Structures are given as structure tokens and as C-alpha cells.
Amino acid sequence: MSLIWIVNILSVFFLCVFFAGIVIPQILLIAFRRRLFDEPDERKIHQCVVPRLGGMAFKPVVFFSFVLLLAVNVSTGHDELLKEIGAEALPLAYAFCAIIMLYLVGIADDLIGVRYRAKFFIQIVCGIMLVAGGVELSDLHGMLFIHSMPSWISIPLTVFVTVFIINAINLIDGIDGLASGLCSIAFLFYGMTFIWFHQYLYAMLAFATLGVLIPFYYYPKIRKQSQWQSQLQ
């Protein structure tokens, strides 16, 4: 692993921690002033009001930090990152389109609410986009005694797993810190795995997302839900 990749991975991580630490409190403040809260009811796990839009900082911070580092790399004559992006252009393009779709639907759901059928349809489209970009569960490498699978099985399985993971994270999102904590562990694992297999571009994206998740996990801990509720009364 060359020094430039070590610098890039560490830089994108700390940039995301820094920018998310600035942006997330401001978003929470806006949610408080505009009274954008997720009210508890019989279908919700949380018992107190929870400010919406906290996750709004995720993709802008990750994309900004990543593109900023790309610009710095090109300006300083280091083209390793640019070459890696060029080699992975197709899966990255489809993945970013899928992420933007989920991001916009998430914001719309927080602000005005989105019907479950519409969200389910978007999730399926995102899964199809990943498959179009070459991301496909075509081999389970012996898990459940399954190895290589034909496309007519692997493609629907990939879409199903994509929808399953999205909804699994959404399901535990109502428990304070659980979703962000588990996702932090997952992205740390992914980042280290990508480094092990010399996939440094994806390691950067994994550690960038981890960098946003840390402040996102931290701020709800210091601003307890009871404080939000008491200020509403």
C-alpha cells in the first residue's frame, strides 16, 4: 500500500468527521426551529420526539470530501485516484445514481412522507442499478453449500438483498444509536477488507462514510431525546 493511498484514506476520513461535525448540529437546529420531528406512536420504537433530517448531511459531506481530495490529488500531480475512478467508472456511476435516488426519497419521506409502495419501487430500481453496474451476488463461495449461480438466480438475489439491507437498516433506525453504531462497525470492516484486497478507492468511500457516521452517532448522545421533548412542552 503506497503512501498516497494511506494519506487519501486518512484525509477523507478526517475531512468527513470535520465537515459532518459542523453540518449535523446545524441541521438538527433547523429541525428543532422548524419543528420537524418524528412523533412517537404505536408503530414507532422511540418514546420521545426525534428530530428529522439528521441524515441529510451524509451524502453531501461524503461527496464533497471525496471530490475535494480528488482535486487536490490532480493539482499535486498524483493521478492514482483519478485512474482508479476511471477503471471503476461503470459501477461507481450506477452506485452513485442509486445513492442519490435513496437520498432524495429519504429527504422527501422526512418532510412530507412517501408511500411505502413508492419507496419499495425505488429500492428495487436501486438494486437493478447495482446489477447494471456489475455488482452481482453470483457466487456465495460455499456459504450454505452454494457456489457459482446462474444469472437468473443471482440477479433477483442481488436485488432482494439490496432491498432487504435497506429495510433492515430503516427498521432499526428508530432505536437511538443502533443503526449508526452497527453501520459504523460494518463500514470499518468493509474499509479494512477493501484495504486487504487492495481496493483502495472503495476503502476511501467506506472510511468516508464511517467519518460521517461518528458525529451522527455522537450528537444524539449529548442531546438526549428528553431534552427535545422538554423544549416542546
Image: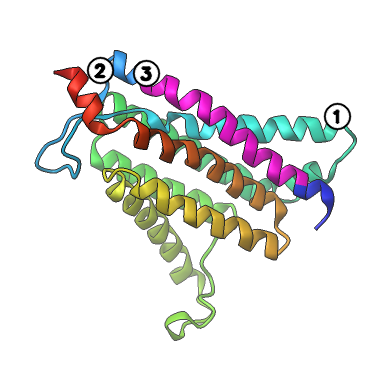
Give the residue number, with chain letter if any, for mark 3.
29
Q: In which quadrant of the rendered image does the N terminus lie?
A: bottom right
Sequence-first tag of 1 and 2 = 2
**Which residue is at the front of the view, 127 or 15?**
15
Q: Nearer the viewer, mark 2 or mark 3?
A: 3
Q: Amino acid at mark 1?
A: Ser
Q: Which residue is identified by label 1?
A: 75
Residue 202: % across, % down: 65, 51
The reply, left or right, for residue 6 in relation to residue 154 is right
* Residues under numbered marks 1 and 3 in contact, where contact means CB atoms less than 8 Å apart: no
- Among the 4 quarters of the image, the one containing residue 55: top left
Nearest-to-viewer mark from 1 and 3: 3
The stretch of residues the image draws in magenta is 7-28
Task: Give the number of callouts.
Answer: 3
Mark nearer the N terminus (2 vs 3):
3
Q: Amino acid at mark 3?
A: Leu
- For disc 2, the marked residue is 35
